[in-house]
Amino acid sequence: MRFVTTPDPRPDMTEVIGRDDVLLLTLDTLRYDVAVEAAAAGRLPNLAAHLPGGQWQRRHAPGSFTYASHHAIFAGFLPTPATPGPHPRLFAARFAGSETTAERTFVFDEPDLVTALAARGYHTACVGGVGFFNKQGALGSVLPGLFAESHWEKEFSVASPTSFEAQVACAERIVSALPEDRRLFLFVNASALHQPNWFHLPGATREAGDSRATHAAALQYIDRHVGRLFDVMRSRRRCFAIVCSDHGTAYGDDGYTGHRLGHESVWTVPYGHFFLEPPA
């Protein structure tokens, strides 16, 4: 397969922040090759309709598993374009000597983007997915603890065949409860792609386990419901949306299985950002 690296239009984030709502949707564990194949085959109509040129950008993950990658993302280190850099960042904590902080970068003095947006009047809300957001112990409370409002339910977890539908319904409730004039930063960690995902492919069995095919089926499941999330996030005003994977995962590639390891299938991830315009 020939991978295509698409252009990276960089909006002026110093204007976006304070004007628009912000959505960060991480498709936990999504592989780049699976995402590209699905988009090229027309199996992601809702996502592809918003991705620039209908294509994913090829990027490198800032970490090889959820906890590490999200810490980096919240500090402003989104997945990096997989071409020689440096690449100016959308968001950046003020840091002496940074080569990726540019004129159009939103720079903050707080330790993370969530806290920075809260300081600028945004309501910050987290809809968790995988175990690092379940608030069932100290470790699972660190990331959701950054937000003013955070949610996790068993229905959002990796074991639920309807996890993303439940997460979108939660997002709809968050937006409906928020005053019209309050800006929102909504973070959603979609767990459906993470193992186990065999139940998203008709005919697959628990005994046969997960595969690239069941991983792709889980992505198509997300696409069927992501339109609702986009609609609610643009219902009040324009929204700047980032949709990306935090890391990939291996399904027997070169003998590797899973993630938290240094393989191409883990480090290379899909990424897209775009504006969701409000209804006319």
Image (cartoon, helix red, strand yellow):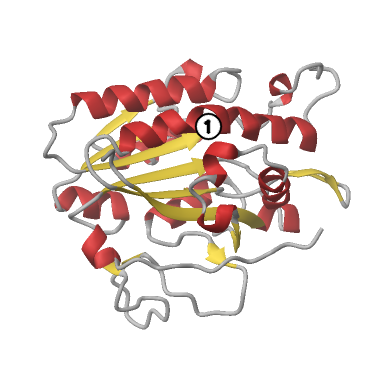
Identify the residue under disc 1: 130
Residue type, mark 1 in image: Val
Tell me which corner region of the image, top left, top right, bottom left or bottom right, holds residue 75: bottom left
| Residue 102 locus on image (x, y percent) | 34, 78
Circle 1 packing at 10 Å, graded few (<14), some (14-19), many (20+), is many
Q: Is residue 222 above or below residue 252?
A: above
Residue appearing at x 63%, y 43% in the figure: 30
Q: Is residue 156 left or right of residue 117?
A: right
Residue appearing at x 55%, y 49% in the figure: 246
Q: Is residue 267 above or below residue 167?
A: below
What quarter of the picture does the C terminus occupy? top left
* Secondary structure found at label 1: loop
Q: Nearer the viewer, residue 17 or 230?
A: 230
What quarter of the picture does the N terminus occupy? bottom right
| Residue 38 locus on image (x, y percent) | 70, 42
Tell me how many marks there are. 1
